[in-house]
Image (cartoon, rainbow, N blue to C red):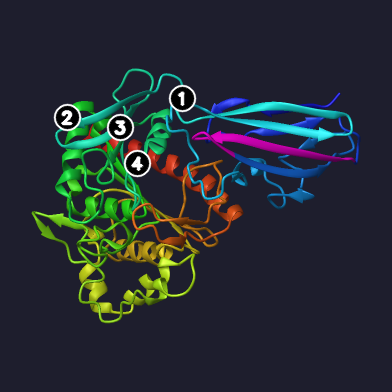
Amino acid sequence: MLELSASPADDLIDVPRRIVVSGAEPGELVEISSRTLRAGNPWCSRASFVADAQGQVDLTVAAVVDGDYPGISAMGLLWSQVPEQAGRREVFNADVQQPLVTVLHATAAAGSVSADLVQRLCGEGVTRSALREDGLVGTLFLPAGEGPHPAVMILNGSGGGINEARAALYASRGYAALALAYFKAPGLSDYISNTPLEYFQNGLDWIRRNLKPKSDFVAISGQSRGGELVLLLGATFPQQVSAVLAYVPSALVHSGQNAADPAIGREGPTWLLNGKPLPHQWENNRTASWLPFDQGPPPHRHTLAMLTALQDEEAVRRARIPVEKLQAPVLLLSAGDDGSWPSSVYARMVRDKLQEVAHPYPVEWQDYPDGGHAILFPYVPTTQLSYAHPVSGRISTGGGQPAPNAEADRHSWQQALAFLQRAVAAHTSKKENS
């Protein structure tokens, strides 16, 4: 009798599963498909395998004969999924407390069989509450059990909004996690232009005042424009930042770009401090040109324009984030085929400056040479390489390919958790010995 199992059948989204079909004829072709409703939209994948001498197909060791992903990948049926409705990008349910349920279906000569695989962003006991006070807009996720817990503030990129998915998973791994919006959320501007850095300082103060984190540890984690932002915040408010996790970041302050207010323009300022715009890379830049991004058919590659701006060394110097002011450990996660901006180049700039000044805290850099801009966390679809930017509407590519992007997702999250664990331990030891 044909049997299909996923083990563990129900767990957090970052836990790998062992998917096994048994009861097939040795040497016969076995097809396995997957279907997941993500925000109400079905995403699907399929792959065929040859049963081994015991009539078994174990996806941790079985190579794909024909299907939606190549080679051997235990979770390939998840990351290779594509939406039935082209253009869909929502890979999580609108309510992140609701699990993602994938129906696996195996077919062989002996018949067919199905099994469920359940992925959760919220572990048991994790609580969610909206934050709408002190001018702040966000969502707080707290771990199960008595605190205090170390804290993380999560900041989104140029799409804006509230990154509840990442905050929920941080909370499931033991961190009080505040996903803080700064534009494109209720009560806030629709655009990134002219965002005051004091808003985020207020967020850090709110965390300390209301959550009283363990050992006063508050990390900041951001991706893309959020990666730029966390480095900038760590350099601007060094006493308030205990660790920095910068996903596909910039080493430079950038203009509004794709998330700019059209009335201000994409070359207008993004960040304000004490009411004044910070100098940015595009400002008085003698070599910068949008043409490599604007010309030709979509999908456009934003990185090409960013590279032109890097040729003006004086403009780069003016716009460089003064990371030497950081007083915390730093984790840099970058992608060599980043279509949005050259995050590998930027991460190297940050790493090199911190080495130059003998930064007294750990600096870790993980670069994924074949990866693209969208580094998330494990076992979500990585197939949507081109997309309409949620603010500008421009059709762009984030770069990379599904398989290397999936590996970057898996490995980067492991690195992030390990980095935070070490940072909390070092911070706690320093507090206890001071």
Residue 64 among those drawn in magenta = no
> In the rendered image, is residue 244 in sight?
yes
Number of marks in the rendered image = 4
Check disc 4 and report its element: helix, strand or loop: helix
**Mark 2 neighbour density, 10 Å: few (under 14) some (14–19) many (20 or more):** few
Residue on which disc 4 sits: 423
Q: Which tag is nearer the camera, tag 2 or tag 4? A: 2
Residue at the extreme bottom: 286
Above or below, comparing residue 324 to residue 83 in the picture: below
Instruction: Give the CA separation, mark 2 to mark 1.
Output: 25 Å
**Mark 3 neighbour density, 10 Å: few (under 14) some (14–19) many (20 or more):** many
Residue on which disc 3 sits: 139
Instruction: Give the CA separation, mark 4 to mark 1.
Output: 23 Å
Residue on which disc 1 sits: 123
Dots 4, 1 in contact, CB < 8 A: no
Residue on which disc 2 sits: 209
- Give, as a single range, the part of the protein colored magenta: 28-42
Does residue 76 appear left or right of residue 144 in this picture?
right
